[in-house]
Amino acid sequence: MLTGWKTSVDLTCNESTPAMPETTLDRCHAPRSLLFVPATSPHKAEKAFASAADGVILDLEDAVALAEKPQARVTAAQLLRTRRDTLVFLRVNATSTPHCFDDLHTAAAAAIDGIVLPKAESAAELAMVDWLLAQLEAKADRPAGSIEIMPIVETARGLAAAAEIARASPRLRRLAFGAVDLALDMDIDIADEAAAMAHARFLLALASKQAGLQGPMDTVFVDIRDPDGLRASAMRARAMGFSGKCCIHPAQLETVNAVFTPSEAELARASEIVAAFEQAEAAGAAAVSVGGVMVDYPVFEKARRVLARRRDR
């Protein structure tokens, strides 16, 4: 397995990055919601592309039976011939399987923003995938480094190596958390939000910040009939520094998008803080009271970040 290899091209947003013609979508904005859809279902995929999701993950892994994986690649290639007006990822199979190599070939020829790599467990694994994508990009006449990698950390080994994984390739913009597989791997209760799952989330948020990545994407919420549980799960993730949440059903999108979008009250408060602090700073002060709360540089910067997440409603 290759180690220590790096490409010189990063995925910072600029005019040379996109591999396909750009749409009106801001692909530099951290997605609030990513909707999984099986690659074997063109009807569901088209509905997902037209949904309120900030991005779609066309799935070649868990949602596809072993016998259907070759046909799933064919269907995915047909669906992804042209650029979509949303973020599009292809979830390939894990590198430990015999399917990943062919999945990556499909990805390189598709009009996608990136791949989702499940069960990521080491920096060497990410370097290997990075190297292979570079070769495939060259053969497909795509700009070098144009295919993003979003690793899912969902095993004990992956969680232990999260900091290394986060720095393994300049293709990474964010990590993703997979609680379902982590619960299986470690034989823990997926509902243990206050202990095991909270600890795992914090490790991913910490690794992401250390590596200069966007906040990670939270795990899916498996009970599509429990919107209150979904909201609570999304709010916990947001409070821990996550940027968004993966979804398994279109009915979850409204809740998830709302949680990861600053409310009108939050935006108003942030605007008040920024205005008051800038006025105080111009007068030579580095702190000011706003509504009885002391505002200094960290509070000011936090408010600026809230305003940066403003979205059209």
Image (spheres, rainbow, N blue to C red):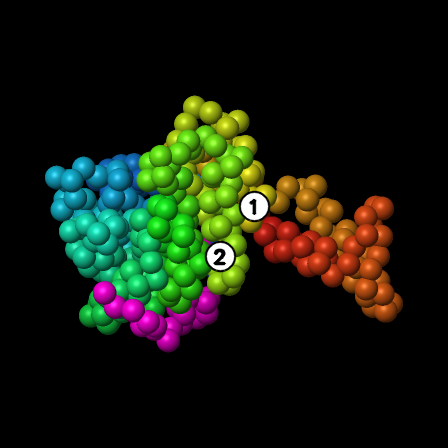
Q: Which residue is mark 2?
A: 208
The stretch drawn in magenta includes residue 85: no
Q: Residue furthest right?
A: 283
**Counting other residues with Cα less than 10 Å from the Cα at mark 2, is it few (<14), some (14-19), or many (20 or more)?**
many
Q: Is residue 145 above or below residue 58?
A: below
Which amino acid, by three-letter code, is at mark 1? Met
- Determine the CA span between mark 1 and mark 2: 12 Å
Q: Quadrant of the C terminus?
A: top right
Instruction: Residue at 33%, 58% (x, y): give it.
Output: 122
Rendering quarter of residue 148:
bottom left
Q: Which residue is at the far top? A: 225
**Magenta stretch, main secondary structure class:** loop
Callout 2 secondary element: helix
What is the magenta range? 1-25
In the picture provided, is 44 more to the left or to the right than 101? right
Looking at the image, can residue 252 be seen? yes
The disc at residue 240 is 1
Which of the two residues, 271 or 124, is positioned nearer the viewer here? 124
> At numbered mark 1, what does the secondary structure look like: helix, strand or loop?
loop
